[in-house]
Amino acid sequence: MKKIITEQPSLSDLDCLDFNYIDQGIYNGDEVKKNIMGTRFTTVARNTIDYWTVSRNNKKPQSQQEFSQHVQNLKFSQRPIHIYIHIPFCKQKCLFCAFNKGEDLCTYSYDDYIECLIDQYNRFLDVFPNKRPIIGSIHIGGGSPNIIGAENIRHLISQIKKTSCLDGNNTEISVEFSLPTVDLDFLDALFDSQVSRISMGIQTMDSETRKAMKLPPLTSKLNEILYYLNKKIPVINIDLITGFPEHTLRKVLKDHAFFIEHPVVNSISSYLLNPAHASGLLQQILYGTIKKLPSHEDSALFRLHTILLMRQKGWVRNGTNTYVNPGKIIEKNFNIISGRECIGSFNYDDCLFALGASSIGSLPGCRFENIRDPEEWIIDIKKGGYGIDLGKTYMEQQNDLALWSFPLNSNGISKKVYNEFIENNAIASQQDVVFRQLIDEGLIYESEDHYSLTILGEIFMGHIVRLLKNPGERGALDKEIKNLFLSAKNNLGRNFNKEKIL
Ligand code: SF4
């Protein structure tokens, strides 16, 4: 039996980010910092999508040619590739959302955007050694992918299928859409394209919270759409968010219970609100026009109770923040759920082709980010470029990726892989020390042949990813999160017209 660490480990170099400063005025009770649930953490993690940031050696390509040369020389595994396609457009502008650019493409049309996505995919294939790779999963996310219309989604999926091989019937094809704007033609196109999973962002059922967050009211359309999808799409996922201002445990549990009990829904992705990406929301909180976010302790309790509720009802974790009900999904469909939630790779030699403005992908020895602005991205693709932002692309093999990404992977990490890290000196000794501490602290569960997160670990997942990173990369990640918060705060009074909201 290992000794339980009761004192705070000396972490001055690990917990270097001055979170106290950036929190000021955003969370309830942020003036009192205390350890939550007996862990080393005084906050819940703010990051959910920044995990793949890397700049240990800061080796960026100087030109598209250098990028292309680098990719051609990479050693690809024979495993299936994964494709993430980003459609960053939406008719709505929810206050907390950073994933869409509105619905306007001034100079170009959605048809142009789709053709560019196909061109970008083919351009990647040109430098890829296997010209007809096997695809493990395709995830089309946004924004609101339904905004491009039924014909475009049909065309996009068929073109990707045409140039690649699907992994028998094991390729997951997943598409997100937005409830207020989706129509039956779009859903029919998904059926025709043999989409295996849909995901619909509901976020919360609570009408007051929806109003405050500028989410449209929910109508009977929710059930109409769900029943239209029933039995035609194997996995029906609902996205929920916890930790909105004024969210209470009662509201959070009510949201989850509704979909747990719903006869059609068999998958729920439950996220914690990420204020670092919600500058509009942060600004309104700081101006006092919207209430503060729940305290960190309350947010952790929301996570704890939602995870417990889902487990109690027989749902199992299958994805980073996703729980599914195995009783409502037939086995062959259950086995093809990739659990990737479009956010990245689990091994250094995974291959994630990210297509579309602002999406982030990784190759075995390269992490790349697409140009953020959709019009600039289209221009680059039309000029024959790769559509990537050279300043945010790193040519570096992240050998330790399976270590720090394991908290995001519901399969955990095998002891065999972990021991290979140690034998091959693939991780810094400090990473091993932290890993052992996290086991002792009850955040990582050690079984005979595996490591996985405990429930406590799931609550503080983002912190664990950060702590398991190589110290150099952790510094870069900290800087990025801090900058996001600070730029939102600094923009007060500049891009933001207080009068408009008062
Ligand atoms: S509908 Fe979804 S993608 Fe669109 S603004 Fe709202 S949260 Fe963002």
Image: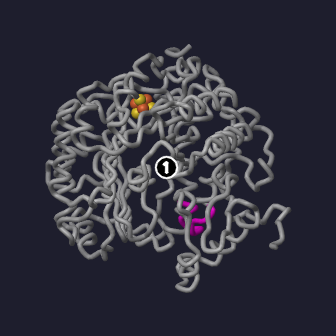
Residue in the image at 47% along x and 17% along y: 217
Residue in the image at 69% along x and 73% along y: 433
Main SS of residues in magenta: helix
Task: Tell which quarter ligand 1 is in.
Answer: top left
Q: Position of residue 474 (x, y in %)?
A: 57, 62
Numbered-mark total: 1
Q: What range of the chain is rendered magenta?
A: 467-476
Viewer-side residue, 79 vs 46? 79
Relative height, residue 68 to residue 173 (above, below): below
Viewer-side residue, 88 vs 342? 342
Q: State whether label 1 is within 8 Å of ligand 1.
A: no
Relative height, residue 449 to residue 215 (above, below): below
User: Label 1 neighbourhood size at 10 Å, few (<14), some (14-19), many (20+)?
Assistant: few
Q: Position of residue 43 (x, y in %)?
A: 70, 46
Magenta run includes residue 134: no
Q: Label 1 sits on what residue type?
A: Ile
* Quarter of the image that includes the C terminus: top right
Question: Residue lying furthest bottom in this view?
Answer: 423
Q: Is residue 390 visible?
A: no
Which quarter of the figure has residue 26? top right
Task: Identify residue for label 1.
Answer: 49
Considering the numbered disc 1 on the image, is that residue within a helix, a strand or a loop?
Answer: loop
Relative height, residue 255 to residue 428 (above, below): above
> On the rendered structure, is 285 left or right of 269?
right
Q: Position of residue 165 (x, y in %)?
A: 21, 60
Viewer-side residue, 397 vs 346? 346
Residue in the image at 70% along x and 59% along y: 443
Q: Position of residue 466 (x, y in %)?
A: 59, 59
